Image (spheres, rainbow, N blue to C red):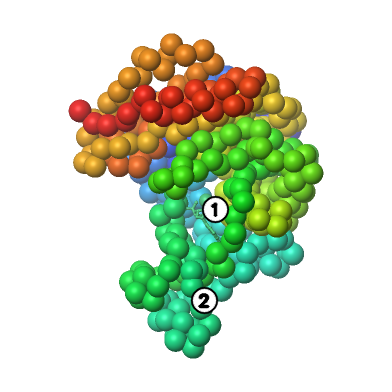
Amino acid sequence: MSNKKIFSSNFKLGILGGGQLGKMLLQDCIRYDIYSKVMDSNKEAPCQGICNEFIVGNLTKYEDVVSFCHDVDVVTVEMENVNTDALEFLEKNGKKVFPSSKILRIIQDKSKQKDFYIQHELPTSNYKNYGNLSAVIKDYDEGKVSLPIVWKSAKFGYDGKGVKIIHSFDELQNLSDVPCLLEEKVKIKKEISVIVARNQSKEEKCFPAVEMEFNDHSNLVEFIMCPANISKELEEKAFDTALKTAKSFNIVGLLAVELFITEDNEILINEVAPRPHNSGHHTIECCLTSQFDQHIRSVLNLPLGNTSLKSPGIMVNLIGENEFEGNVKYENIEKIFEIPGVSVHFYGKKKSRLNRKMGHVTIVHKDINKAKKIGKKVKKLIKVTSE
Ligand SMILES: Nc1ncnc2c1ncn2[C@@H]1O[C@H](COP(=O)(O)OP(=O)(O)O)[C@@H](O)[C@H]1O
Ligand SMILES: [Mg+2]
């Protein structure tokens, strides 16, 4: 790659997935004048219309992925559910694929992810993998399962879909009959995330740790808060764990590491994502280099950017509240524009539906508590519904 021009040239960056993470990657591709080619199954995906080439195709279909990649110089992803056999074939034929098929194969499967942490002596909660529901019930009958316990579908879960806290045998019996794992329910003090970037030259950098603030009533993530309200000592420990994890995977690109801080101040890895992450959106406004800029630098083996904080900030997701899908409508959005330090991001999804991520708002303020106050106001004001 070093002897090939990347900027303002015929170099092509291929991105598998055309959602909001892709859209925000493209904003930096445009800034750097890097030619972009994106594939998504939805012809109206957020990236459509703002990349140089948009291909409608199935990310999980071998032929679609191979054919999409034939003329790109580097392939990356904005979501992990892509056909890894196709990526492996491409790697064997000399294509640069970051993150690699090997990493994606592990991360796509929560059971394999947990096994990986154990093999690499990385801290994680106790768990057991199961091939199907009857194997879970058999263990329960033999007294090997103590409730409450956390059930996770091994594959295809996201945004909390595919995770259930099980309190009774009745709930256990009604679980989907799919490969799954049971995890010890951790006594969580705080949930934090550290995003690490690594390039091929093995340069590596962490973004400041962020904290997920949950709504006491709904138990949904209300804010991402940066910096996390934790001691320097704990943050250093979190950086160590995140860097060790990224190194163990030998990742090139971003690795978002979701961590639990337990009531005993222990740090446990919950899960990882090998791409830009919801917990890093604030970096656009809050850090010298954004996670999207950093991902592009990492996969193109450019020097990594400085991740220092420019300003503390809060990120609020804009989530569809309408039960039935319809054309999106943002209520009270003008009022948000009036508040200093507030940046609004719309993902360009035409249809809103319940719990769909439609956009986000970042609030910067030198006093994080003031930012939080404004965040609460923003949350109360804005309503994402349909016409
Ligand atoms: N072992 C656990 N103990 C307690 N809570 C957990 C555990 N695992 C997950 N959770 C809770 O469930 C949430 C979603 O789990 P996660 O594995 O991150 O799924 P997803 O892929 O949907 O993000 C976590 O953010 C955390 O709040
Ligand atoms: Mg998660």
Q: Residue at x 50, y 85 (%)?
A: 143
The image position of residue 332, as x and y in percent, is: 33, 19
Say left or right for 366 vs 201.
left
Depth check: give the residue in front, 318 or 180: 318
Query: Please, what secondary structure does the residue beneath circle 1 have?
Result: helix
The N terminus sits in image quarter: top right
Say left or right for 182 vs 263.
left
**Amino acid residing under circle 2:** Ser
Q: Residue at x 65, y 37 (%)?
A: 228
Q: CA distance from mark 1 to mark 2?
A: 40 Å
Looking at this view, name the residue that lies furthest to the bottom.
142
Neighbours of disc 1 within 10 Å: few (<14), some (14-19), many (20+):
many
Depth check: give the residue in front, 195 or 169: 169
Above or below: residue 76 compared with residue 327: below
Looking at the image, do the residues carrying marks 1 and 2 touch, with CB atoms under 8 Å apart? Answer: no
Instruction: Give the label on residue 146, or none.
Output: 2
